[in-house]
Image (spheres, rainbow, N blue to C red):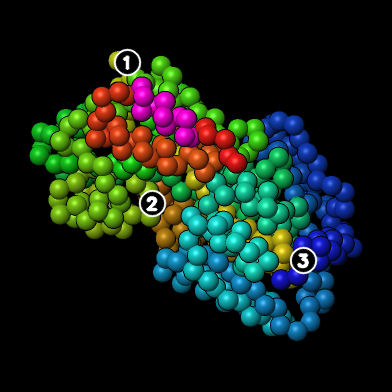
Amino acid sequence: MKKKLVAVLMTAAMAASLAACGAKTEAPAQTTDNTTTEQTTGDKTEEQTGTDVVINQGSDDAIANLVAATEGTVDLTLWCSEMESYQNTMKELVEEFKTTYPDVDFNITIGAQSESTCKDEVLKDVEAAADVFVFADDQLNELVQAGALQAVTTTYTFDPVAANGAGAVNAASLNGVCYAYPLTASNGYFLFYDKSVLTEEDVASWESLVAACEASGKKVGFDFGNAWYLYGFFSGAGCTATLADDGVNNVCDWNNETGLAVANSIMNICSSDAVLSIGNTDAVSKAKDGELVAYVDGTWDVEGFTTAYGDNMGCAKLPTFDVNGTATQQGSFAGYKLVGVNSYSDNIGWSMLLAEFISNEAAQLKIGEATGEGPANINAAAKISSPALAALGAQSAFADLQRVGGNYWTPAGTLGQALYTGTDDVQAALDEAVAGITAPVE
């Protein structure tokens, strides 16, 4: 790929072509709160509630100009999940994209790249990375800071701010600028359970859930050594673990009085032989064996638990847990998958148009039907329903965007494992974890 200056110049040229076709040429209007804003796109006025991000939208003529300005073969690389369902769906969407623009000769390569590690691969060599890539929303800050993402300041076919839920738009935005196209809104976790063993009342709290498993001789699982899941216990009680204002270091207060009470509650839950700290692959296996009747997990394992529990598969928001005698709702991380455009792409215009195409309403609906994940698109989400997505929706009221720096993961995971196995000095374990989480980044 060429240097970023070239990419910027190409973007400017694209914006000029939009202006020539009647799109707005002034900078996007910015609002200062989350109240309803009006957005003008050509001759059309739309209302969008719950976001302060406004995008200028182009016209059909802008696409015609792009086609007319294109010479030779357009080479593009798309990275998306290595899962077979994603790879197959993206292949279908890419073929549809080519058919939509038959006057252009495309050479589009689809690579397999997990969303969870996409940022790391992109930042190894941004210029050599894919033109379009799917990534987890918690990677947005670092990608923006590295200058790897083309801002979505202008669009061709639809406005992602208006089309997608406010939570997804916020996850795709930084400082009032949208940097990616929302794709899914289901990268969170909830409780799977076997309805032939457990009732809705049993799964309402950790205390009743553990008691029911003890009585039935079954197990409940949770990955206590995984910092992503552990977060929900502390956040539910009002403790903080988040990025500092510098966007690199962490702020964490888990070693305060409330955090100590949370830690003791976790240890009390884990003191039962009916509680297993276990990863998702082993959990699905034990569920199929009939040993595990409840587990905290996400939509990616719907198929496994459906196979294990059959018609008795139940899904619910996370249970409450006792904190100093008060039933406290467990929190969680809310996650989104986003589509980014590489700011170093040699074909910025076509990269943006491809990113729009694979994240529009029809595409999100197709992805949701193939993978079981929930669309970020408002209309597509209304057309897909399942027990898992309903449970995730119920949990979303208690979920936070994942915004923590790299120093969070190992210390928090170590703390979770220590609480599961038991420790004689809980306060010391908390102090050590917080020291690691908040350690300055060199």
Q: Is residue 428 magenta?
A: yes
Work out whether residue 77 or residue 187 is closer to the camera in this orientation and state it: 77
Work out whether residue 229 or residue 162 is closer to the camera in this orientation and state it: 229
**Secondary element at image label 3:** loop
Q: Main secondary structure of the magenta part?
A: helix
Q: Which of the two labelled residues, at mark 3 and mark 2, occupies the earlier sequence position?
A: 3
Q: Name the residue at the right extreme.
A: 20
- The image quarter in which residue 427 lies: top left
Label 3 and label 1: CA atoms lie apart by 58 Å
Label 3 and label 2: CA atoms lie apart by 39 Å
| Residue assigned mark 1 | 324
Q: Position of residue 433 (x, y in %)?
A: 42, 32
Question: Which residue occupies 61% across, 58% down?
Answer: 123
Compared with residue 140, is residue 366 higher up or lower down, i.e. above or below? Answer: below
Instruction: Tell whether 427 sits left or right of 116.
Output: left
Q: Residues within 10 Å of mark 2 (few under 14, many from 20)?
A: many
Q: Position of residue 196 (x, y in %)?
A: 16, 44
Residue span colored magenta: 427-437
The amino acid type found where label 1 is placed reads: Asn
Q: Nearer the viewer, mark 1 or mark 2?
A: 1
Cβ atoms at labels 3 and 2 below 8 Å apart? no
The amino acid type found where label 2 is placed reads: Thr
**Secondary element at image label 1:** loop
Question: Which residue occupies 15% across, 48% down?
Answer: 291
Work out whether residue 117 or residue 325 is closer to the camera in this orientation and state it: 117
- The image quarter in which residue 129 lies: bottom right
| Residue assigned mark 2 | 299
| Residue assigned mark 3 | 3
